[in-house]
Amino acid sequence: MSRTQQDALSRTALGVFRLNGQLLAVSEKLAEPAGLTAAWWQVLGAVLPEPLPVAGIARVMGITRQSVQRIADLLVRDGLAAYAPNPAHRRAKLLAPTEAGRAAIARIDPGHAELAARLTAALGGQDAFEETVRVLDRLSAALEAVEAVGAVGAEERVD
């Protein structure tokens, strides 16, 4: 790997870490009036289209199953989600939003729409925003492909 490649990887990682922090901070602000945290919003958002098992939510979000389980249990405790039987797997119940959970997400929508409009303008329009999404998707897919080839950072063993 060349020094230029390493520098590009380092700058990319730092940029993504910074972006993650920025998105989490703005998400916390958007979610707060609805009585949610950014993490609760993420998990509820993952099951809005259809109920999913905790492991499925974790895969979609790219976080550990244990983290999702903790949040899912809190959402259920507070009546924002419920567990339902999973016809595909007896022990892995499905998490689904309740009406209260859907209402909480709906309260976030106006602020979310305003932020989306402001970001679209700051990026130079919808096409530029869509290109940003494509680049991030491409980076994620490339990292997945590299990880699939072998353990990142593992040294080759010669026996």
Image (cartoon, rainbow, N blue to C red):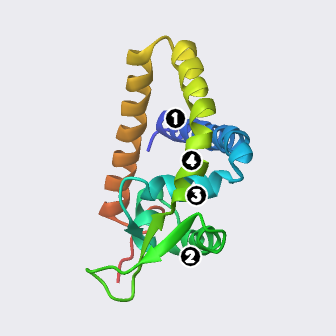
Which of the marked residues, 3 or 4, is nearer the chain's N terminus? 3
N-term-proximal mark, 2 vs 4 = 2
Q: Nearer the viewer, residue 45 or 7?
A: 45
In the rendered structure, the answer to whether residue 134 lies left or right of residue 23 reads left
At label 4, the amino acid type is: Ile
Secondary structure under badge 1?
helix
Q: How crowded is mark 1: few (under 14 residues within 10 Å), some or many (20 or more)?
A: few
Please state if 1 lies on the left or on the right of 20 as rendered: left
Point 45% across, 56% down: residue: 46
Where is residue 135, by image quadrant? top left
- Is residue 51 visible in the rendered image? The answer is yes
Q: Is mark 2 on a helix, strand or loop?
A: helix
Q: Which of 131 and 90 is in front in this view?
A: 90
- The residue at which mark 1 appears reads as 8
Q: Is label 1 in contact with label 3 (beta carbons under 8 Å)? A: no
Q: Where is residue 93 in the image (x, y as percent from the top left)?
A: 41, 80
Q: How far apart are marks 1 and 2 (CA)?
A: 32 Å
Q: Distance between the residues labelled 4 and 1?
A: 37 Å
Amino acid type for the residue under numbered disc 2: Gln
| Residue shown at the point (34%, 47%) measured from the top left | 141
In the rendered image, the quadrant that contains the C terminus is bottom left
- Of the numbered discs 1 and 2, the one sitting upstream in the chain is 1
The earlier-in-sequence mark between 1 and 3 is 1
Gap in angstroms between the C-alphas marked 3 and 4: 9 Å
Q: Distance between the residues labelled 2 and 3?
A: 24 Å
The residue lying toward the viewer, choosing from 37 and 121, is 37
* Residue at numbered disc 2: 66
Q: Mark 4 points at which residue?
A: 105
